[in-house]
Amino acid sequence: MTSMLRRAAIAGGVALLSAAAAMAADVPTGVIANAEFAKVDGSQAALGANVYSGDVLTTFENGSLRLRIGSGQVFMLASSDATLTQDHGRMDVLVSHGTTGFSGTSADPLEVETPVGVLRPANNSHAFGQVTILGPKQVQITSYEGSLVLSRNGEERVIAAGKSYSVSLASASAIPASASSAAASPQGGQGAGSNGNGGQWIFDAVVIGGAAVVGYVLWDVLSESQSHP
């Protein structure tokens, strides 16, 4: 009898966990605020539609997509790909191609995952920035407003407002000893810093332009249209 009760309790626990997981999967993590030539999980993105953890986001040539996640926002420029994942109450936007930007504070459950680390607002002040994928281990990060923080393997770098950097990962053997002996702050212009076993960051200051300007203009236009319907 005891054995039967134990098996019944285990089965009941498994059923409850499965039900909880199913319910979590059905809870929307955001809503589409603007969409043009964009898809969510292979279906045409529609204004006001919910998005969920696990959704794959795609914009085509001349396309764009903007989401509200909590009180924060995410936008994607043309020819971009990203996936939504949820981890410990935070929504990760895993960027694999193109340009993705975000707006919010550190209190918002939102962060952008890139090939070189996780990007999020540095503090409770409002921040607005974006990242462009340049290669398998290289991105361009631009902060338009507020400070952003890039983290990887327990190390962090702050990117101040108005700054833009090309950030890449290189193995320790590829960094000169003089550069790897001291971690350089991105605000200093350029340099390398140790980054655990995952390689080293190399920061190169760049002039804001190209996709960065397009992203800022698009965000400004969309935000203005949202506040003045």
Image (spheres, grey):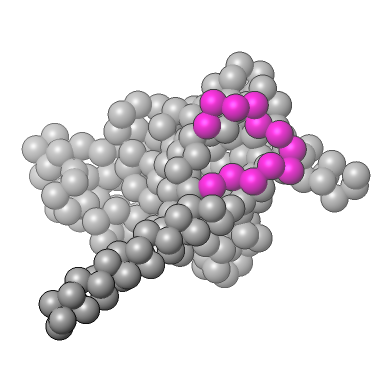
Residue 83 on the magenta span: no
Residue 44 on the magenta span: yes
Q: Is residue 23 left or right of residue 144?
A: left
Residue 116's image quarter?
A: top left
**Residue appearing at x 43%, y 63% in the figure:** 20
Q: Main secondary structure of the magenta part?
A: loop
Residue stretch rendered in magenta on the structure: 41-52
Viewer-closest of 189 and 172: 172
**Residue appearing at x 49%, y 30% in the figure:** 81
Viewer-closest of 92 and 15: 15
Report x, y in % for residue 205: 43, 39
Residue 136's image quarter?
A: top left
Residue 205 visible, this orientation: no
**Residue appearing at x 43%, y 61% in the figure:** 19
Q: Is residue 112 above or below residue 213?
A: below
Quarter of the image where the N terminus is located: bottom left
Report x, y in % for residue 132: 48, 33
**Residue appearing at x 15%, y 83% in the figure:** 2
